[in-house]
Image (cartoon, rainbow, N blue to C red):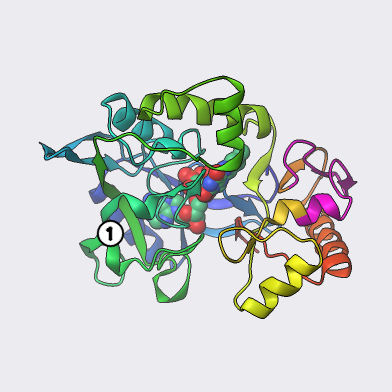
Amino acid sequence: MRLGGAARYVVEVESEDEVKKAWGFAAEKELPVYILGSGSNIIGRDGGFNGVILVNKIKGMGIAVPEENGMIDLYANSGELLDDFVTYGTQMGFSGMEALSAIPGTVGAAPVQNVGAYGQDISQTLISVRAYDDLLEEIVELPVYDLDLGYRHSIFNSGDGVGRYFITQITVRLKRKTLKPPFYNSLQKYLEDNKITDYSPESIRKAVRAVRESKLPDPAEIASSGSFFKNVYLKTPEEIKAAEGRGIPVWDGGKIPAGWLIEHAGLKGQVFHGMRVCDKASLVLINEDARSYADLDAARKEIIAIVRAKFGYTLEQEPMELGE
Ligand SMILES: Cc1cc2nc3c(=O)[nH]c(=O)nc-3n(C[C@H](O)[C@H](O)[C@H](O)COP(=O)(O)OP(=O)(O)OC[C@H]3O[C@@H](n4cnc5c(N)ncnc54)[C@H](O)[C@@H]3O)c2cc1C
């Protein structure tokens, strides 16, 4: 979002050893640690961060277990870009991550909120995570079933696991197969409009990239955190019936797209305190000329209040926050 104050210390780490050392440095200074991938899902607060930021630069990827029965295990160190890892797997012809193409950020952040897009999320292919555990002060291997992965949720972003682990590597299992239609709405439309019937991992990767480029701002040029609000999940059949009765779309047995609510509250393209509701994707807030976190805070409160007044749902923010 390109907002927020300064950090007291910033340390770039290139290996598991350096993670341990940097964490020791923070402990010596009695300062908190914060882990940064590429910062695409973090918003800095105005007071800055009186602590040590560890910037992840641990590189490398390869084959963990060679192909057998049409399956392959690939590993990536956590400082690699997720999109490079997705490209690596799909270009070898393996399916499982192609819909995650062009999600900004590093491999290490992917399990944190269980990144997902166009019908896939990392939980579907992840088999394990390697991490430095600050509580045990050692490297641990965590199998996927210990990570409590759900929609934008894991042990790394909720409960006791927050701030405890520095993910250093992930391993995924991909399959030699081709996805079958129907695909997620906008992807399906793109494939039909362009008469694409090749659903190979590489073809889907290219299609996803094209759809994303047409809808989402490029974080290298325009300041945003991608989806700013989480979709609303209804829990009971009564809630679903009530929403549908009011003409509100409910997908996948309970999901109301937050972008639909924002758009139908009339907010698309509107600017609040320098923050614009993106014209192409209402779920995205763009920092046009906001000067501080306080501007963003005011914009967020107004948007939430307008959506609540119109539909009765309280939107929750997706990106994390850092600092005081
Ligand atoms: C234009 C745009 C589009 C986006 N589209 C999507 C999308 O389609 N789907 C989706 O799921 N997300 C999307 N996002 C959000 C973002 O891409 C993901 O959250 C991504 O995983 C963030 O990666 P990062 O390296 O930038 O993480 P950061 O923003 O640096 O960190 C995110 C969180 O993960 C923690 N973290 C980072 N690395 C590690 C590590 N090695 N170990 C432990 N904790 C760590 C951080 O402390 C922080 O809490 C989008 C963002 C933008 C800007």
* SS at badge 1: strand
Please identify the quarter of the rendering in which residue 317 is found.
bottom right
The spot of residue 156 in percent (x, y) is: 42, 64
> Foreground: 270 or 26?
270
Residue 27 in the figure: left or right of residue 231: left
**Disc 1 beta carbon < 8 A from ligand 1?**
no
Residue range highlighted in magenta: 261-282
Q: Is residue 293 visible?
A: no
Please identify the quarter of the rendering in which residue 98 is found.
top left
Residue 144 in the figure: left or right of residue 286: left
Residue found at x 29% / y 69%:
146
Residue found at x 63% / y 30%:
218
Q: Which residue is mark 1?
A: 132
The spot of residue 284 in percent (x, y) is: 71, 45
Residue found at x 35% / y 62%:
165
The spot of residue 11 in percent (x, y) is: 42, 46
The vertical placement of 112 against 190, above or below, is below
